[in-house]
Image (spheres, rainbow, N blue to C red):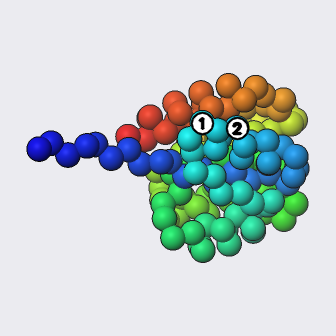
Amino acid sequence: MPTAEIHKVPTVLVVDDEPTLRKLMQLVLEREGFRVLTAQNGYDAMDVSESHRGVIDMLVSDVMMPGMDGPTLAGELRETDPNLPVLFVTGSCERVPVHKDEPFPIIEKPFSPGNLVLTIRKLLDQRH
């Protein structure tokens, strides 16, 4: 009897210092079937990452946040998972963050829920 293929539910870490936007991204992604972890800044995200028992499949982070910013957070998380997909969201015209000569994808606020989901799925598909 053939075994059913097990579909892993991707876990996305959403980091944004704006509580309303963070919650909105969480709701949109959960509705689309993702498991979502949230954090309010880079330091909080590091704590969430270290206490999470499973794999984090993707980071979605604001670029500018108090304390540890998004690019620094991405660099820290990529120390343990060099292939971690990263998507930055930003409300201003910041330059595209770069990690080891690799530009990270970025979407500007305000963005549509559909664009967020489509971009995340595309980045996750590229990883596999």
Please tell me in which quadrant of the rendered image residue 17 appears: bottom right
Q: Residue at x 60, y 36 (%)?
A: 32
Say whether residue 38 is visible.
Answer: yes
Among all residues in the image, which is located at the extreme front?
1
Residue under label 1, please give it. Answer: 32
Left or right of 58, for residue 113: right
Please tell me in which quadrant of the rendered image residue 102 appears: top right
Q: Amino acid at mark 2?
A: Val
The x, y position of residue 16, in whole percent, is 80, 51
Q: Residue at x 60, y 74 (%)?
A: 51
Report how far apart the C-alphas of labels 1 and 2 lie in the structure: 6 Å
Q: Badges 1 and 2: C-beta atoms under 8 Å apart?
A: yes
SS of the residue at dot 2? Answer: helix
Q: Which quadrant is home to the C terminus?
A: top left
Is 41 in front, or is 20? 20
Is 48 in front, or is 43? 48
Q: Residue at x 11, y 44 (%)?
A: 1
The x, y position of residue 62, in whole percent, is 77, 47
The x, y position of residue 114, in whole percent, is 67, 25
The x, y position of residue 76, in whole percent, is 61, 63
Residue under label 2, please give it. Answer: 28
Please tell me in which quadrant of the rendered image residue 50 appears: bottom right
